[in-house]
Amino acid sequence: MATVEIDKVAMRSLRLEAAARPGRLRVHGKFFFAGEHKHFIKGVTYGPFATGSHGAQFPEPVVVDNDFALMAQAGVNTVRVFTVPPVWLLDAAHNAGLKVLVGLPWSQHIAFLDRAAAQAEIRERVTTGVRDCRRHPGVFGYLVGNEIPPDIVRWHGAEAVRRFVRGLVACVRREHPEALVSYANFPSTEYVTIDFTDFVCFNVYLHDEAAFRRYVARLHNLAVDQPLVLTEFGVDSMRLGEEEQRRILSWQVRSAFAAGVGNMCLCLDRRVVYRRASDRGLGVRAGRSSAPTQTLPWGGSPPISERLAADIAVLPAGLRRRLRL
């Protein structure tokens, strides 16, 4: 499909999605609700990016508008970002009928509990990030952390880390009382009990279907009566290739739905990451091309037809249909 055709389809989808955008979300039992209707997260990750000309770690507004329109056209309803978005990006998401799950980044890879000043700085950064979002209607909720490293948790102790994260949740609720709040955990630190958030989030990368099914069942036990969200899952397509990527993504989505997970964020955006994957020997996650990482000037972005359209096309037909459930 040509770039002009893609943009026409995207903007038509933008108008349709905007007419049906959900209102404020709430949690009831193991489900999210928009009004009286259940709301299932059909999400993708977006970023992290290099700093653009506008000063934020996101692409230029015209690129964001086209990305969001194509996401809505593909059936996506939620975008997970890893840095605090500017208000214009929240406006763009809201206009496209998308909700934004806002990551609140802080220095979690240092011994942050060893210094009172570091703790105060983190609390202030989280509070400022929430304040900068201005209680925007496009905000789905906030994540007060993402995968605190296991060695840091062992150094400080699980209970001390748990108390600190609970304090960050309180910071968010003071600044935006109506917002939903969570923390993105992962298998290596599942022993840190996060039972004070509105929903339970886990990043899960398992390439064995039986192990994936077993671990999702375990996560339901950990979530008890709260909604369970897979905030990241996918594959290393740099090493596995496109066909294997399709195969694994197909059974991951199918298995997750079969196991009762109706809320997922697929790592399918073709990110221009601040630290290139090749620098650390890391593969490209789900939905991105198996081609080597592009060398671009920081702040630049590939054309929309090469970025998001390619990401959507790589998904199996069954997965594209499931996005519309």
Image (tube, rainbow, N blue to C red):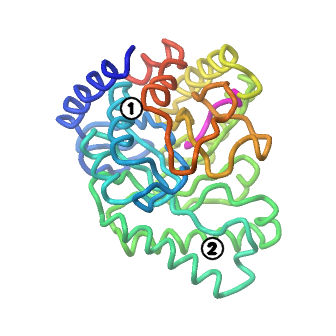
Q: Give, as a three-letter code, the residue at label 2.
A: Arg
- Of the pair 170 and 86, the residue shown nearer to us: 86
Where is 105 relative to 298, above or below?
Answer: below
- Of the pair 151 and 27, the residue shown nearer to us: 151
Location of mark 1 (residue)? 71
In the picture, measured across the screen, residue 63 lies left or right of residue 12, that is right
Whether residues under marks 1 and 2 lie with C-beta atoms below 8 angstroms apart, the answer is no
Which residue is depicted at the point 72% across and 28% down? 238
Location of mark 2 (residue)? 163
Residue 224 appears at what percent x and percent y? Answer: 56, 47
Q: Which quadrant is the C terminus positioned in?
A: top left
Q: How many marks?
A: 2
**Magenta-highlighted residues:** 231-237
In the picture, measured across the screen, residue 182 lies left or right of residue 155, that is left
Label 2 SS: helix
Marked residue nearer the N-terminal end (1 or 2): 1
In the picture, measured across the screen, residue 225 lies left or right of residue 108, that is left
Residue 110 appears at what percent x and percent y? Answer: 74, 71
